[in-house]
Amino acid sequence: DELVFTGSTAKLFTVGSVLDTLGADTKLKTPVYATSAPVDGTVNGDLVLVASGDLALGGRGAMQGRMDESFTDKTIDHVYGNIAPIASTTGGDPLAGLNYLAGQIAKKGVKTVQGDVVIDSRLWKTFQGQEGPVPPIFVNDNILDLNVTPAGVGESATVKASPETNLFTVVSEVKTAKSDTPAEPLGVSADPNDPHRLIVTGTIPAGKPQLTIYRVPNAADWARTLFIEALGRAGVSVTSPAIGTNNEANLSPKDVHYEPLAVLESPTLGEMGKMINLTSYNTGANAFLCLLAVKDGSTDCDDGLKVIRKVIEKAHLDSDEVVLVDGQGADPASTTPRQMAKWLTWTDTQPWGKDLDAGLPRLGETGTLASVAADPAAKGKVMAKTGTSAALDPATMRALFNVQSLAGFMVTKDGRRLVFDLSMSGGTYPSVGVGLTQSNDDVGGVAAAFQQALSK
């Protein structure tokens, strides 16, 4: 009954509320329309892509109806590529959705767009999350992946960007060190005199390629350029330059509807929620908060918290003992173990409970628990959401973990399905990276010990 920080276990409230309110089987539709009907293959107006909040837009294997996450026992998802040297890119072509939309437009006979291409991002007001802006448009998680390949010791490493685009040029100032040099996160910054010129810095061990990332500051400009480039690949030319500012000023009122030239359908919200929880994707969880606000008739993402509160009360929790400030679980998000256990017990009885359960990392197998080195006998028998809140001492670079938490279920040898909430507070570590590994192993190990003890 004591309030403790949730960290990302708060995503259980966010994702569960979306599944309950919007439906686990719901799919989002992203249309593209022309402001004037094509005549003889020419649009004498603009093409408008209307953002829907689709987290993948065809990437992460979404064209096959799934949402890949790149956690294994050796790597983590690319969304953490700026803080961990073991990140890897996601599955599927990140431009698959834009290529599909462009192909559909070409099949309608469109060859030329005399106007502009515009991303309509008015679904919600861009939310400011802990990791940056949360818009309703996502292409490759609004991340430019930078694959860094070491050269000879003392030589400059090479960098290849993905997805390929003319929006950025990349300069490598990464030096290759001896192979036994510990891998550290690399730095990426935009040239102060040219925001389209990115400079990658740091040191990389010989023979050990590494992924780092650049979070695109303006998602609408990013999506616009990538869509114009996709149209070009499909044989559709656009008069306006591909690199430029997304201009929403002249868009029609939102209640004016045009016949779409193309529509992309997302995977289900259940599948999206699964990816959010498996990867602990903060921006995605905040986008889910925004979808809740939109469902309630608001463009202010904070109003999504009111919807979560309604679901919490529907589950008969003590609402005063659940503190939430966003969708991801940023501090001071807190609850008591009793309320978290009540929430999980309730979700397990809901028609969508199986969808929430499918997104819980499995100990030693999937998601943020894939790499946990716990009792092998407990492997796959603990399924739970991880949560982390850490702060860095800038003088010593040591990390204080306000919480490392784990909330979910465990299955005993005799088939009992038990709910639990477990957290550690106050651990200090030489760095955030070391702390993430050691604290996750420790808390996962405690959960495994409970599962084994309760199986005897």
Image: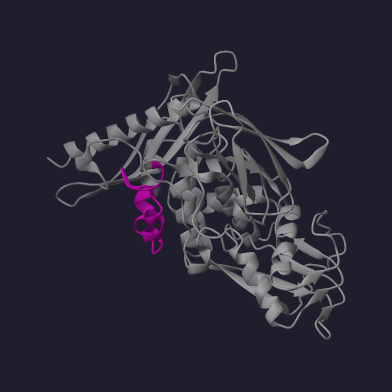
The reply to whether residue 219 is visible in this rendering is yes
Q: Quadrant of residue 95?
A: bottom right
Q: Position of residue 281 (x, y in %)?
A: 52, 46
Q: Residue at x 38, y 38 (%)?
A: 406
Q: Position of residue 369 (x, y in %)?
A: 36, 42
Magenta part of the chain? 344-368
Q: Nearer the viewer, residue 36 or 10?
A: 36
Q: Nearer the viewer, residue 443 or 422?
A: 443
Q: Position of residue 305 (x, y in %)?
A: 59, 48
The reply to whether residue 19 is visible in this rendering is no
Q: Quadrant of residue 59?
A: bottom right
402 sits left or right of 369 in the view: right
Residue 346 lies in magenta, yes or no?
Answer: yes
47 sits left or right of 15 in the view: right
Q: Residue at x 52, y 64 (%)?
A: 62
Relative height, residue 244 to residue 373 (above, below): below
Relative height, residue 122 to residue 147 (above, below): below
> Which residue reaches farthest top?
395
Q: Nearer the viewer, residue 454 or 159?
A: 159
Q: Residue at x 72, y 53 (%)?
A: 222
Q: How is the image coloured?
A: one colour
Q: Quadrant of residue 159?
A: top right
261 sits left or right of 410 in the view: right
Q: Position of residue 250 (x, y in %)?
A: 87, 64
Q: Residue at x 40, y 46 (%)?
A: 367
Q: Quadrant of the N terminus?
A: top left
